[in-house]
Amino acid sequence: MEGALGVPLPADYKELYEVFGGSIFSDSLYVLDFLGHDEDPAFDFLTRWRVSLPVDQDSKLGNVSAVEPYAIYAPGSKGLVEWGSTEWDDEYFWLIDAGRPGECPVLARSHDVGAWHRYDMSTSEFLYRVLADANFQPSGIAQYDLGTTFKPGSGDPFDGQPL
């Protein structure tokens, strides 16, 4: 992963991924996987990044980016890399700057609100706050009382296990 991106992933995320892998929390929040096979490319971190990069940089589409005012991260530059989402089309990204490796604030965008929100916290803290803090706005899902479940991998999101 880091070789493809050309920068290190956040250290706390690597620890989180080592424990949980790609996963589904509360039957609605998806942390992308590093599948490396064809199980489900829609949940594969590298596949999603590789597909979004050329589309974001296609000059035939003009200067419009799906992540405006940002751009999708290209090795050696500064931009966004998606690492998670929700079933409601909320999207979670890191803002990666090749000139500042290791600094990866979380940027989140909710499709019902549309604005970007920056969180200068670790991926683990952000994930915890989204799942457990009912007052974490606008990204928290704890307010919906979905229960606390975890399912490894990118399979059936309705087969979660209680934490």
Image: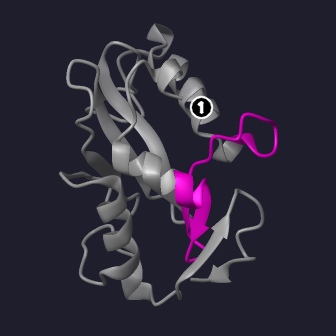
Instruction: Work out whether 12 lies above or below 135.
Output: above
Residue positioned 22% across, 55% down in the render: 121
Total labels: the figure holds 1
**28, above or below 61, in the image:** below
Q: Position of residue 6 (x, y in %)?
A: 42, 18
Q: Nearer the viewer, residue 100 or 91?
A: 100
Q: 30 or 90: which is nearer to us?
A: 30
Q: Is residue 85 above or below residue 128?
A: above
SS at circle 1: helix
Image quarter hosting the N terminus:
top right
For residue 10, what is the image quadrant? Answer: top left
Q: At which x and y percent is residue 103? A: 22, 36
Q: At which x and y percent is residue 93?
A: 38, 44
Amino acid type of the residue that numbered disc 1 sits on in the rendered structure? Leu
Assess disc 1: are there few (<14), some (14-19) or many (≥20) residues with their C-alpha within 10 Å of its C-alpha: many
Residue beneath the point at 25% across and 32% down: 69
Mark 1 = which residue? 46
Residues shaded magenta: 18-41
